[in-house]
Image (cartoon, helix red, strand yellow):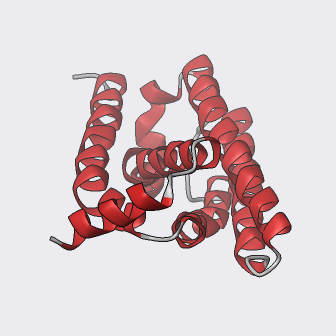
Amino acid sequence: MSPEIIFNIHLVLGYVAWLFCFRTYLLPRLKSMDRIEAQRAIATLHSFRFFGLVFILPGVVGNLPGSFTAFAAYWDLATGVLAILALLTVRIRPLFWLFVFAFNLVGILDLVLDYYHAVRTGVPALAGQFGATYAIPIIYVPLLMITHVTAFYWLLYPQKKGVRAFAGDAAAS
């Protein structure tokens, strides 16, 4: 089997596994929380996106295209910093919501454009060049995308208090 096929199978199964895990364990817990607390939990996960700078650390990844690695590294950093700013401004609600929206927008754009750049530059065929960072696109990125989509959904369609209370009752049972 070619590296490209293996990479794509891993990527798809990473999404499948995280969707099962998210739906079964994480989503009920997030739904039982106050919206601010749920967004803080998501922002906390994304605050670790500074780790994407590993793509431009000499000697960590092999010969992946520089246009892919640099874009992924710096946009991950931007997303992580915006998530940290959201966490720091939770007591200043207008700023908090601005940073929540910003880190989710930048983060989704980062991941979508990373996929585009990866396909355009043939990264799946070079999957072995990721080295230890192979886990990032296969294990970490699917969870990031799923939580971005969830956060945006809640920003666009806030849940009513009665529904949230019911979800909390369901999660407790």
Give the camera-side residue of 95 and 125. Answer: 95
Q: Residue at x 77, y 67 (%)?
A: 96
Q: Position of residue 110 (x, y in %)?
A: 67, 40
Q: Is residue 43 above or below residue 72?
A: below
The picture quadrant where one finds residue 105 is: top right
Q: Residue at x 79, y 76 (%)?
A: 89
Q: Is residue 133 visible?
A: yes
In the picture as drawn, the residue positioned furthest to the front comes out as 162
Q: Residue at x 54, y 63 (%)?
A: 42
Q: Is residue 65 visible?
A: no
In the image: residue 151, left or right of residue 9: right
In the image: residue 72, left or right of residue 162: right
Q: Position of residue 154 (x, y in %)?
A: 56, 49
Give the camera-side residue of 57 and 84. Answer: 84
The picture quadrant where one finds residue 66 is: top right
Q: Position of residue 4 (x, y in %)?
A: 37, 24
Q: How many marks?
A: 0
In the image: residue 19, left or right of residue 159: left
In the picture, which quadrant includes the C terminus? bottom left
Q: Is residue 32 above or below residue 8?
A: below
Q: Is residue 116 above or below residue 76?
A: above
Give the camera-side residue of 167 and 107. Answer: 167
